[in-house]
Image (cartoon, grey):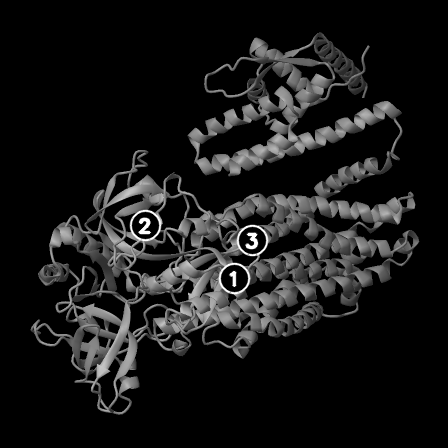
Amino acid sequence: MPELNLGELEQVVLLGILAQGDQAFSLEVRRGIQETTGQRVSRGAFYTTLERLKRKGLVDWEVSQPRTARRKGTQRRFSVTPAGLEALRSTRATLHTRWMRLDQALEEL
Amino acid sequence: MIRRLAELILARTLPEGPTGESIRADLAEELEERRKGEPRSAASWWHLWESMKLAAHFALFRLGEARRARRGRRGRKHGGNGFMGSIEQDLRFALRTLRRRWVFTAVAVMTLGLGIGSATAMFSVVDGVLLKSVPFEEPGRLVNVWLTEEDARGAPGLVGRTWNRLPFSLPEYRSWRAATTAFEAVGVHNGVETTLTGEGPAARITLGVGSASLLSVLGVQPVLGRWFLPEEEGDGTTLPAHVTVVSYEAWASRLGADPDVLGKSLSLSGTPYTVIGVLPPGFRLRHLGMHWLGEDTRGLREVWVPVGGPSLGNGNNLEAVGRLAPGVDPVEATDETARILAQTGYDGVVRIVPRSEDETHALASPLVLLLAATGILLLIGCANIATLALGELQGRGSELSTRSALGAGRVRIVRQLLTESLVVGLGGTVLGVVLAFGGTRALVAMAPPLPRVETVGVDLRVLVFAALLGVSASVLFGTVPASVSARRSAAGMAASNRTASKRRSLLERWMVSAEIALTVVLLVAGGLLARSFQRLLAVDPGFEPRGLATVSVYLPEETFGSVDELPAVYDELMAAIRDIPGVTRASAITRLPFPGLTNTNNLRFIGRDGGEDFTVHAQQLYALPGYHEVMGIPVVEGEGLTEDQARDSIPETLLSENIARRGWPNGSAVGARLRVWRTEGRVVGIVGSVKRNALGAEADPAWYASLKDLPAREISLVARTPGDPVALAARMRETVQGLYPDVPVRQVTTLTDLIFASAGQERYRTFLMGLFSLLATLLAGVGIGGVTARGIAHRMKELGIRICLGAGEEKLLRRVVREGLINGAVGTAVGLLAALATGRLLAGLLFQVAPFDPSTYAVVTGFLLLVVGIASYLPARRIVSLDPARVLRAE
C-alpha cells in the first residue's frame, strides 16, 4: 500500500480536475476549486502543484483546441491518471483510518 | 511597456513548451477579462504583479525539484551537497528567516525600493536627455560651428547673451562649403514660422529652412521621397525652388498620412509649395543660439523649405553644423574655417563644439546634481538598513551562536548574512523598478521643456542600471553586519556579549551620524535652491502681472488683406474685448514679455545732444495705445502712446528706461530722433524697463512704436480684470473666434502663468531636490528612532535598576533624548562641513543666494536637530511607562 503522500492542495487539485470532467482546463479547474471551497488558491501554488502532480504521474494533460474564439495561445486539458485515482483513494483510506483511531481515543478519554 | 516587462518575466521563468505557453495564455485571458472591468493601467499592474508571483513560485519549485533529484541520486544524505548545495541552502534559509522577521524585511525592502526607484527614475531622465543626447549617426564627428562677437559679450539684450553662438549668413556659408576640406559635409538650418492654409483652418506652424546638404551631415534619410537638391537652394540672386519636405508628425496629423502625398501642393504663407519628401518620425533639430522664436527646446519643424529665400527665413540667421572628415581634429577644422571666412570679411573667432555637448550645456549640471541627490538618498537608505540589520543581529545572537557551536564556520555565517541581504536587495530592486516606471512617467510629466524629454522611458539600459544599484546596495548594507559577526569567534559571541554589543552600538551610532551628515548635505542643497527660487519669483518683472489675461492671434493676408487694412481690424477686436464684462482695460502688442519671443534690431540715435550717434541693440515692439497702462508699466517721462497720431508724420516712439539712462545719463531722451532700418522715429516718452525672457536676467532694452503706424499680422491681445484672469482668457478666445472664425488663436493664458512657466527649470529642480531631501530626512528619522528604540530595549535592565534606585523617569528620558541629540549634532557638524565643501557645485544654479548662505545653514541645522529630537523622544517615551519590577523579573 502506497504511503500517504498527497498534500492538501494536491488532493484539492486532483478533486477539482475530476469535478470538471472533460472540461478540465486549467482556468476552469482553478475557478471551480475557489467556488466550491471558498478559498483563494494562488496562481503560483496552483500551477506548481499541477506540475508536481504531473511529474509524479498522477495527472496527465493534452494540448486542446481553444475553447472560445477569444482565447489566444495554447490550452491544456487535464485528466487524473489511474495512479492519481489510486493515490486519492489511499489518501482517503489512510486519513479515514487515522480519524477512526482518533475518535476511539477521544471516546476513551 | 508594463505588459512587455511582465511577459519578459514569464518567458524567463516558466517552463518551456506547452506548459509555459498555456500558463501565459491563461494569464493573458484573465488580463483581457480584467480590462473590461477596470482601467487599463490597473489591469497592467495586476498582470505584472501576478507574473512576478508566478515567477517566484516556479523558481522555488525548480529549486525543490533539483534538490529532490539530487537526494534521489545520493540517498537521503543531509547537507554537504557541495558548494551549489550550500548556496541553495543559504537561499532557502534566508527566505525563511526573512519571512519570519517580516517587519524588518518589509522596512528594508521599502527603504531600498524607494532609493533605487528614485535613482532609477532620475537616471532614465539623465540617460534620455544627456547621455543619448544626439540621435544622429556617429555623433562624435557631428559639430556645431559658431561665429562670435567678443565686443557684444555681456551687453544687455539678445546678442549680449548669445555673443559666442552667432549664426552664419548665406554668403559666408556658401564660401565655407565651397572651400572646406576639414569637413566631410557642412550644412545650415534655421527655424521660423509660416501660415499653412488649405488644410483645415489656417494654422501657424513651425517652418525649417535647410541646406541641401543638411540631411547627409546628420546622417538621416527621408522615409518617403527625397530631400532638397543643391540646385533647389537659392543663392541670393535666384530664389529657392518652391518645394517642401514635411515632418512625419505633420504628415500624420495634418495630411492624414496620405501615402500619395508626393507631388501634392501646400500653401505656405499664401505661396504654393510642392511636397517632395517626408522625414522620419521623431526628427528634431534644435536651434541652439537664441533666436526670435525664443528658446527652442523641442526643435520641431513641421515643414522644411530650401535655404536662400528672401522672406521665409532669409539667409542671415543660419546655424551651421558640420561632420568632421575622419581623422581631422576640431582645432584644425576651426583654423581652416576661420581662414575661409576671413576672405568673406569675417574677422572674429570661430568656435567648434561637439553637437552633443552643445545641446545639453545648460542642463547637465542640474540633472547630474539631482542624480547625485538620489544617489545620496540611496546611501542613506543603505545606512538605515545596515543599522536595522545590526539591530536584528543583536536579537539573533543566540541563533548565530548555536549555529556556530554546531559547526558552522565563520565564512559560512558571513555568507549566510550576505545571502539574506542579497535577497532583500533583489526585493528592493524589483520594487524600485516598479516605482521607477511610475516615477519616470511623473518626472516626464512634470518636466519643463527639456530636449528629447518625450523619448524618456524605462528601457533595458535603465533596468541594467537598477540591477547594478541593487547589487551594490545589498553588498553595501550587507557587509556591515556580516563583518561585525565575522570579527567575533564562536566562543567570544557567548562570553563577551557585552563588549560586542557595546561595539555594535558604537557602530550603530556612527552609521546614524553618517546618515544625518548625508541628510544635511541634501537639505542644504534643497534649502538653497528653494530660497533662490523664492527670490526669483519675488523679482519685479517691470509690470503688474496679476489680473492680466492674453490670447495671441494671427491675421492672415487671405482673410484680412494688406497690412493697411489691419488698424480697422484692431479697433474691431479691441472694442469686442473691452465689451467683455469685467474687463477694465485692454490693448495689444506684437510680442508680450515672457513667451520669450524676441525681435531685435539696431537702434540708432541721430543728432544727440552730446554729439556723436549712439547705437543700441534693442527689442522693437509695436503696441496699441494704452498698452503700458494695461500692463502697469510706468510712464517715467513724457507721455505714452496715444490715439491721435497722423500716419504720415514721423512715428512717435517710447524708449525703455535702461536705454534712456545709458544714452542720456544726465539729460532727457524725450525729443530725440532715431532710425531703425528705413524707419525714422521721434521719442515722446520713457517707460519702465521690462524683463522679457527670464526673471533672473537683466531687463532687455526696448523701444515701442504704435501698431497703427506699423501694423503687424501677429499680435497678442492683453486685458486686465479685477476678477479671474483664467476665465477671462477663455472668454477672450471665444470673443475672437466669434468675430473671425478662421483666425488661428494661440497662447490663451494669463501673464502670471507665463512668468511661472519661464521659471520651469528652476521649479523642477527645486521641487525634486526638496522632495529628495525630505525623503532623506524621513529615512534618517526612521533610522534614529529605530536605533533609539533598540538601545532602550537593550538597556531595560539598567534603566529598571536606575528607576528603582530613585532616578526620575523624566531625567532618564531627557538623558536618552540628549544622547540622540549628541549623535545628531556630530552628524550635523560633519554634514555642514560636507555641504560647505560641495556648495560651490550649486553656485551656478543659485539666484541672489550665496552658496554659503548662513540663514539656510542655520534653518537646516535647527530643522534637523528638531527631527532628531522627535525621533529620539518618541521611542524614549516608553521609559516613563516602565514598570521596574516587571522589567527586572523579565531579566
Q: How far apart in space, not on screen, are marks 3 and 1 (Cα)?
A: 12 Å
**Residue B408, picture quadrant:** top right
Q: Which residue is drawn at 22% across and 81% down?
A: B686
Q: How far apart in space, not on screen, are marks 3 and 2 (Cα)?
A: 46 Å
In the displayed structure, B381 sits above or below A56; it is: below
Say which of marks 2 and 1 sits in front.
2
Task: Indicate the amino acid at tag 1.
Answer: Ala
Q: Which residue does the numbered mark 1 point to in the structure image? A: B364
Say which of marks 3 and 2 sits in front.
2
Q: Mark 1 falls within which chain?
A: B
Are discs 3 and 1 less than 8 Å apart at CB? no
Coordinates of residue B679 in the picture (x, y in percent): 17, 73
Coordinates of residue B186 in the picture (x, y in percent): 43, 56
In the displayed structure, A73 sits above or below B269; it is: above
Q: Which residue does the numbered mark 2 point to in the structure image? A: B231
Question: Looking at the image, is mark 3 or mark 1 earlier in the sequence?
Answer: 3
Q: Mark 2 falls within which chain?
A: B
- Toward the viewer: B349 or B720? B349
Q: Residue at x 49, y 20 (%)?
A: A71
Question: Looking at the image, is mark 3 or mark 2 earlier in the sequence?
Answer: 3
Q: Which residue does the numbered mark 3 point to in the structure image? A: B123
Name the element at disc 3. helix
Coordinates of residue B670 in the picture (x, y in percent): 19, 85
Residue B724: tell me if it is visible.
Answer: no
Direction from residue B698 to residue B875 in the image, left or right: right
